[in-house]
Image: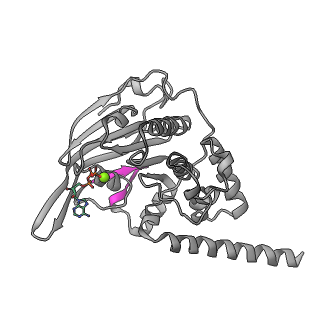
Amino acid sequence: MQPNVCYTRHIQQEGDELETAIQVRDLKKVYHVGQNSIAALDGIDLEIQRGEFVCIVGRSGSGKSTLLNMMAGLERPSKGGVVIAGKHIEKLSEAQLVRFRLEHVGFIFQSFNLFPALTAEENVAVPLTYRGIGRRKRLKQSREMLTQVGLQTHLKHRPTQMSGGQQQRVGIARALVANPAIIFADEPTGNLDSKTSAEVLDLMRSVVGAKGHTLVLVTHDPEVARWGDRVVHILDGRITSIEVNPRPGAGEETPPDAVPPEQLKQTQGCTADRAVEAIRGIENAENGAEASRGNQT
Ligand SMILES: Nc1ncnc2c1ncn2[C@@H]1O[C@H](COP(=O)(O)OP(=O)(O)OP(=O)(O)O)[C@@H](O)[C@H]1O
Ligand SMILES: [Mg+2]
């Protein structure tokens, strides 16, 4: 499936070779619940190019999140495969998958998934913690990223002290701070009103587009899907059609100097308290090391 030139305008320069970011081949997923089998994905073939903004749209239960989770290596397919950065991710071990996600993938969630006890700058710095970057450096990167999403005045705010749109901007900054090649977003505007949704989508489009990140966004809302370069329609686990959205001009004027990402479905799996505890533990260890270095000088 070759991409149409009209959506390569802010993806790749003319003359550049198209580069496949994600290749999905005959992907199937069957869930077994009691006596019932549910074919959540029923043979999906899809190619997504580097720098593309692809929206996957379909009604509730059509398989959107399942597809996204398979592409992100969060769930294993029953059949078929996903190739990202030359790797068949369905063949990776759990440990390799965690590493793969940390290196290549950022996530933006419908419910923001911010840690309530952490400030905006601490939340955005979390993916860098997992990468072993020191506190001072990661907070600096975090502040730069928050500035790019227009939240330089909210660095010390906790999630409850921010609006939904601001929280989602923190979520975007967190997804990008470690500079992942691919951002996956599952209903990122599902908890926002239509005006704030448009602002957040505009921001995602411009921040992600500026550095050639690939963005795959799942939504049930055709209005949201219109923001994509391509719209993949899915029904009962199958692609029913793919449309190209020519959108001259949109999202090209605001190219902030995006830094990179995270992937943190792992943080969905553990409680916020445990994650914060882990982060605080790392920070305490760092502070201890700094203090003992100070004592030695
Ligand atoms: N872990 C699971 N176990 C059993 N069935 C599942 C599981 N996850 C998803 N399903 C089923 O697979 C189908 C697709 O689910 P999926 O979550 O991908 O839908 P969706 O398109 O994201 O829907 P929504 O818009 O409501 O989020 C549904 O029928 C769902 O019930
Ligand atoms: Mg879903």
Query: Considering only vertical position in the picture, is 103 above or below 272?
Result: above
Q: Quadrant of residue 214?
A: top left
Magenta segment: 81-90
Say left or right for 100 vs 32. Answer: right
Query: Considering only vertical position in the picture, is 32 above or below 234?
Result: below
From the viewer's side, name the closer residue of 79 and 144. 144
Residue 16 drawn at (x, y percent): 48, 29
- In which quadrant of the rendered image does the C terminus lie? bottom right
Q: Quadrant of ligand 1?
A: bottom left
Residue at 37% across, 38% down: 54
Which residue reaches farthest right?
A: 297
From the viewer's side, name the closer residue of 59 and 132. 59
- In which quadrant of the rendered image does the N terminus lie? top left
Residue 169 drawn at (x, y percent): 54, 46
Which residue reaches farthest top?
A: 248
Count of numbered badges drawn on the protein: 0
Q: Main secondary structure of the magenta part?
A: strand
Say left or right for 90 vs 160. Answer: left
Q: How is the image coloured?
A: one colour
Which residue reaches farthest left?
A: 35
From the viewer's side, name the closer residue of 33 and 293. 33
Say left or right for 66 vs 264. Answer: left
Query: Considering only vertical position in the picture, is 4 above or below 79?
Result: above
Q: Quadrant of residue 286?
A: bottom right
Residue 264 sits inside the magenta stretch: no
Residue 179 drawn at (x, y percent): 56, 49
Residue 47 drawn at (x, y percent): 33, 40
